Image (cartoon, rainbow, N blue to C red):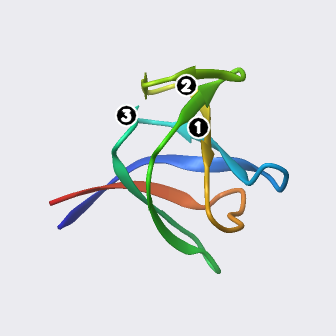
Amino acid sequence: MTEEIIGNVSDFFAQPVVAGIELTAPLRVGDKIRIKGHTTDLELVVDSIQIKNANVTEAKAGDSIGVKVSDRVRAGDCVYRITE
């Protein structure tokens, strides 16, 4: 299992529980990601991606996206794609 950095958390919204992420590499629905920071360590499968409140199935490097998360994340946390 390898991890590749694909972006950073730029914002967190509590209702609904969504992480704002600035991508440095592409991301697709169904990808497994890990969000890791000083007090954060969260793994999840991306089940939806939003760009400007519109659902998309994939996003490219440079996009600012929203991803539903199961717990609090913090600005500056690193986002990794996990591959088998």
Q: Is residue 40 above or below residue 5?
A: below
Question: Which residue is found at the position 20% from the left and 63% from the top?
Answer: 2
Label 3: which secondary element: strand
Check whether the beta carbons of the residues at disc 1 and disc 3 lie within 8 A of each other: no
Q: For the residues carrying marks 2 and 3, which lies nearer the camera in this image?
A: 3
Kindly indicate the quadrant of the structure image that contains residue 38. Answer: bottom right
**Left or right placement of residue 15 versus residue 27 in this view:** right
Compare marks 1 and 2 and give the one earlier in the sequence.
1
Label 2: which secondary element: loop
Check whether the beta carbons of the residues at disc 1 and disc 2 lie within 8 A of each other: yes
Three-letter residue code for mark 2: Asp
Kindly indicate the quadrant of the structure image that contains residue 60. Answer: top left
Give the residue pinned by disc 1: 22
Three-letter residue code for mark 3: Arg
Q: Is residue 42 above or below residue 53?
A: below
Question: Which residue is found at the position 71% from the left and 63% from the top?
Answer: 74
**The C terminus lies in quadrant:** bottom left
Q: Looking at the image, how many numbered discs can be counted on the residues?
A: 3
Give the residue pinned by disc 2: 63
Give the residue pinned by disc 3: 28
Task: State the residue lying farthest toward the right.
Answer: 15
**Residue 52, image x, y percentages:** 71, 20
Tell me how far mark 1 sits from mark 3, CA to CA: 14 Å
